Amino acid sequence: MSITRLVEPDRIPDATRWVQSGVNLANRYPGFLGSGWVRSHATSHEWHMLYRFADHEQLATWENSDDRLRWLDLGRDLVVESRVEKRTGIEGWFDAPQDAPTSSAPPRWKQAVSIWLGFFPVNLVFTYLVGWLVPAFGHLPVLPRVLVTTLVLTPIMTFWVLPFVTGLIRPWLLAPPRRA
C-alpha cells in the first residue's frame, strides 16, 4: 500500500506517534512485512507512507480489522489522506510520487546498479551453495538450471534483497545530479 497523507507542521510529533502506533498494531497481524514513511523535503506537508503484507488476503484482514478502523479514527484530526494506491509487485520501488516533479525518480542507470548490487551476490551465493549441496545440478542443461535459479531467486530478490538494497542506498538513489 502506498498512501499520501497531509500533516500540518505543528502536528508532526503527534502524527509521528500515531503512525508508529499503527505500525506497531499492523505488526501483530499475520503477513505484515514492514512499513515506512518519507517526506520529499523538511518542510513538506506530504508524507508518503508505505506498508506491505505477504498477500492480498492478509492485507484485506488488516484493512478490514476493527483495530485498524479504531486507529484511523484516532488519526482523523492529525492527518488528511490524499491518495491511496495498492501495488502488487516491484512497480513502485523506483516510482516518484505522482505529484512530484519527474526529475525526483532516480535515473535508470542508478536503478540498474541497485538491482545488480542485490542480484550479483545473491546469485553467486546460490550458485556456490547449489553446486556444493547438489553436485549434479551443474550437469543439467542450461534451461532447467536457469529455470530453477530464477524460480528460487526471484521471490528472494523481490521480498527481501531489493527492498534492503534500495533502503541502504536510498540517499544515493535520490541524490540530485551533479552539475558540470
Image (cartoon, rainbow, N blue to C red):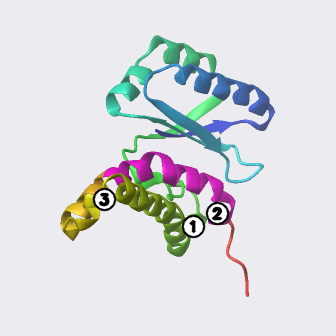
Up-down relation of residue 154 to residue 109 (above or below): above
Closer to the N terminus: mark 1 or mark 3?
A: 1
Residue 91: give x, y in percent of width and height.
41, 55
User: Per the image, is 76 magenta?
Assistant: no
The part of the image, by quadrant, that contains residue 75 is top right
Q: Which residue is mark 2?
A: 174
Q: Are marks 3 and 2 in contact (CB under 8 Å)?
A: no
Q: Which residue is mark 1?
A: 106
- Per the image, label 1 sits on a secondary structure element best described as loop
In this view, the residue in front, 105 or 33, is: 33
Q: Is residue 77 left or right of residue 124?
A: right
Up-down relation of residue 160 to residue 178 (above or below): above
The residue located at (49%, 67%) in the rendering is 116
3 or 2: mark nearer the eye: 3
Up-down relation of residue 82 to residue 142 (above or below): above
Residue interval drawn in magenta:
152-173
Closer to the N terminus: mark 3 or mark 2?
A: 3
Q: Amino acid at mark 1?
A: Pro
Q: Which residue is mark 3?
A: 135
Q: Are marks 2 and 1 in contact (CB under 8 Å)?
A: yes
- Per the image, label 3 sits on a secondary structure element best described as helix
Q: Amino acid at mark 3?
A: Pro
Residue 112: give x, y in percent of width and height.
49, 70
Chief SS of the magenta region: helix
Q: Residues within 10 Å of mark 1 (few under 14, many from 20)?
A: some
Residue 47 in sight: no
The part of the image, by quadrant, that contains residue 86 is top left
Residue 55: give x, y in percent of width and height.
35, 33
